[in-house]
Amino acid sequence: MPRENYQERLDELREDVVAMGETVCDRLDDAIEAAVTGDDELAQSVIETDHEVNETYLALEDECTELLALQQPVAGDLRLVTASFKIITDLERVADLATNVAAYGGPEGGVHDAVDVRDLGDGAREMVVDAVDAYAARDPDACREIAASDDAFDERCREASEAVVRELLKADRARDAARDGPAPTDGEALEASLDEVSQALLAVRDLERVADHAVNIAARTLYMVENDDELIY
């Protein structure tokens, strides 16, 4: 393969990874909207089109494998290909998590309102967008900022999970009061089924995992740019 064509393929690989990231972020947007509003049609669209992301992932995986096998890149080129291979894996998993999040709203309404899915979802999505932008711009400082922001996001997820548990306890107390005497006037407002609580906790867990994949992307990008593995281990 002529050297010019080889360099073009590396450039195209980087562009294709960024395009995949943009597609995945769009799917995550739709998933968050479906979870918040309970839009079953939108949720089904996210779920049913996941195969498109999988096909993109497989095509880029093949491209990375071929570049490694036929070109045997070294130094910076090798780090670009191997980092891209890892990053598309993280993006594919973000898309899988988006299908989960989309399904949590259900046809009867959105995720339990003890969880601000919009706020958490937007936060996780922003981390993925920033990570893909850092990859595109080869920005090591942005990579470190993304990793540093993860602790704060984890804390937000912890607080959200605790809020769900508190709502469950309130509902249990309301049911106990109803058995012992007249139900409190706000008993229905506090009622939360086990399924609703479970879905809310799963939504929080999956959004936290989305943020974790954003950190993984940032870590691989930092390694690609500076040969620095400080965020990987």
Image (cartoon, rainbow, N blue to C red):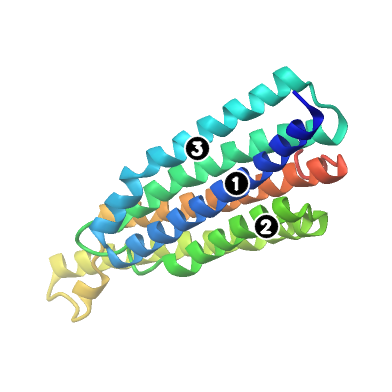
Mark before the other along the chain sequence, 1 or 3:
3
Q: Secondary structure at mark 2?
A: helix
Question: To which residue does mark 3 refer?
Answer: 56
Q: CA distance from mark 1 to mark 3?
A: 18 Å
Disc nearest the viewer among 2 and 1: 2
Between 173 and 132, the one lying in front of the other is 132
Crowd band around label 1 with a 10 angstrom C-alpha radius: few (<14), some (14–19), many (20+): many
Between 179 and 63, the one lying in front of the other is 63
Q: Residue 76's spot in the image, x, y percent? A: 84, 36
Question: To which residue does mark 1 refer?
Answer: 213
Left or right of 227 on screen, residue 210: left
Image point 70% across, 25% down: which residue?
67
Q: For the residue marked with disc 3, what is the amino acid?
A: Thr
Quick one: quadrant of the N terminus?
A: top right
Crowd band around label 3 with a 10 angstrom C-alpha radius: few (<14), some (14–19), many (20+): some
Pointer 1 with pointer 3, Cβ within 8 A? no
Q: For the residue marked with disc 2, what is the amino acid?
A: Asp
Quick one: quadrant of the C terminus?
A: top right
Which quadrant of the structure image shows residue 74?
top right
Left or right of 195 on screen, residue 8: right
Q: For the residue marked with disc 1, what is the amino acid?
A: His
